[in-house]
Amino acid sequence: MSQFRASYGPRALVLGGSEGIGAAFAQALAARGLDLTLVARRRDALAGLAAAIAHEHGVDVAIECADLAADTVDATAAALIDAREYGLVVYNAGAAHGAGLFTENPVARELGLVRLNCLGPTAFAHHALRRMVPRGRGGLILVSSMSGLAGSGHVATYAAAKSFEIVLAEGLHWENAHRGVDVLCAVASLTDTPAMQTSGMQIDALPGLTAMAPHDVAEGALNHLGQGPVWCAVGQAAIDAARAMPRADLIDRSSRMAAALWRLDTQPHGA
């Protein structure tokens, strides 16, 4: 624990830190002795979690309310990063909130997904790394999804945005590993979170599919930090198998899985 704090302390910034995987990261980091700043939209959820973590682990926990899908995300990132010294930044915002055909969703929803999953990670990574690199230590974790491994009908923008996070982390890992700063993309599989439960997703639609616990995702990512650019919650073999499939087959499988999970038509009307 002392080595982790020396590498990534004294404080971690957890974005999307009020529930689910973000809350699990907060708990795991507090258990490693790091003070925290938790960021999300809902103050009540943040305040309750912060109080519980501070009581259990005896660390300082600050909270900040922010909408990371707003077009002011760069200014938000600059203000948050400049306010304190962070040894670790975890960008966990960006869960899927439903599914549907691209042309049947409001364009504002699709653009919000891009801001949340592309502009947000870019802004926070840039501001954080510019401070970490001169110190010669620190870490950045971007939380992505298995959806980012291929295009997928019904979640087309979400899948594309999650792919961006994987590729961004790979490039930033290459640039910064020799400068003492660790960058990791944590590729989550289906995870039992409040966001998943309220999205309308029906896990029982795919027999044999079991949602992971948020704790397992957070612990796995933290244990892999510094060991490579990408960590997959269900194992590297899952990524390798997906990438080995003919691309058209992988896209079709991903699209059919999305349709099944939200009980949508497998094919759009007229197809």
Image (tube, grey):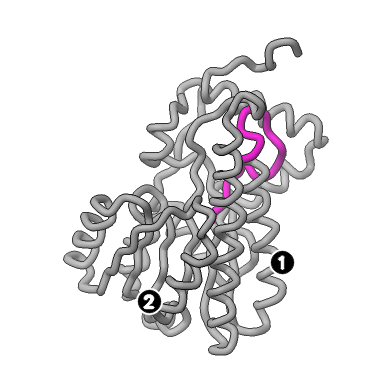
Q: Position of residue 38 (x, y in %)?
A: 35, 63
**Crowding near pointer 2: few (<14 within 10 Å), some, many (20+)?**
many
Q: Is residue 150 above or below residue 126?
A: above
Determine the image quadrant of residue 245.
Answer: top right
The answer to whether residue 91 is magenta is no
The residue wearing badge 1 is: 171
Determine which of the numbered discs, if any, sits on residue 11 in the image: 2
Q: Is residue 210 above or below residue 204?
A: below
Instruction: Give the camera-side residue of 254 and 77.
Output: 77
Determine the image quadrant of residue 229.
Answer: bottom right
Considering the numbered disc 1 on the image, is that residue within a helix, a strand or a loop?
helix
Q: Amino acid at mark 2?
A: Arg
Direction bottom: furthest residue: 135
Sequence-first tag of 1 and 2: 2
**Crowding near pointer 1: few (<14 within 10 Å), some, many (20+)?**
few
Residue drawn 47% across the image and 65% down it: 76
The magenta segment: 143-157
